Amino acid sequence: MRRISFLATVPLALTLSLGLSACTPPTPTTIASATPTPAASATASAAAPTPASAATLIVTIDDATLEGGSASLPYARGAKDAWTAALGNEPAEPPSEVVNGYDFQETVWKWPGLQLNVPNDGSENGSHVFVSASTVGGHPIRTTQGIGVGSTRAEALAAGAVDGFDSTELRLDVRDAPGTKSLQRPDEVGREFISLILEGDTVVSMHLPADDFSDL
């Protein structure tokens, strides 16, 4: 911000001797003047602007996008470079999980607060995202409804979430998955959704896509 300097100007005051018999010419009184303060240069550097907030990373069942961007971030092996560029650093790659003796045959990419599991066969089916922080790589991370880690149960319900398996889960964007059979609802088609995991009334993690037809 440039400062405007104001120069104080003191009028000239002149004192004259009025004595008729004086031989010495009148001596003027010293002029009072203020020392001017130099005005700020028009070329002075402006204060550095405050950086804009990082774009929100919006996650859905199918992919993710940076708010305002046109390119999607697929949940797929070929998207590693795109994810690395979006989040600002290379992910760690811990070993694939083995559950009950079953090796998922997948690659795990892990950033602080976000983990992406992608099948080794290159298929996009079977990819999963796990979110455990409200901000990842400097980007707030939210669903399309604005729900993320730290949201409340009331906020999730107001955004359209429905009850999940029990009181520790809510579900968003529930949709049928043709060709599957629900393990939770006998004789009905399976469903995919965003699973919101809660501790008390606060969302502490998100899993997407989650479903009700997988047994692992």
Image: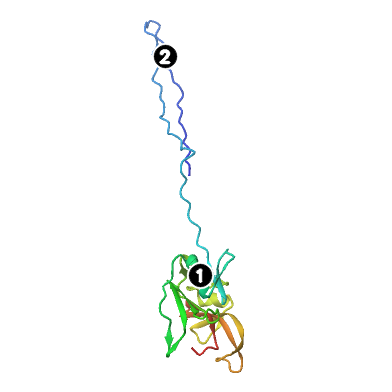
Q: Residue furthest bottom?
A: 187
| Residue type, label 1 | Ile
Residue 213 location, x and y as percent?
Answer: 55, 89
Which secondary structure, mark 2? loop
Between marks 1 and 2, how big is the CA–CA gap? 81 Å
Residue 43 visible in rendering: yes
Instruction: Report crowding for label 2: few under 14, some 14 to 19, many 20 or more residues within 10 A (C-alpha).
Output: few
Left or right, 201 with reference to 22: right
The residue located at (47%, 83%) in the rendering is: 105
Q: Which residue is mark 2?
A: 16
Q: Residues within 10 Å of mark 1 (few under 14, many from 20)?
A: many
Residue tagged by mark 1? Answer: 141
Residue 58, placed above or below residue 197: above
Mark 1 vs 2, N-terminal side: 2
> Is the residue under label 2 in contact with that under label 1 (CB below 8 Å)?
no
Q: How far across and how far down the image is residue 151, in percent?
A: 50, 73
The percent position of residue 79, horizontal first and vertical second, equals: 52, 71
* Labels 1, 2: front one: 1
Residue at 52% x, 63% y is: 55
Give 23 or 114, whichever is nearer the viewer.
Answer: 114
Q: Quadrant of residue 189?
A: bottom right
Local secondary structure at mark 1: strand
Residue 203 in sight in this render: no
Residue 1 percent coordinates (x, y): 48, 44
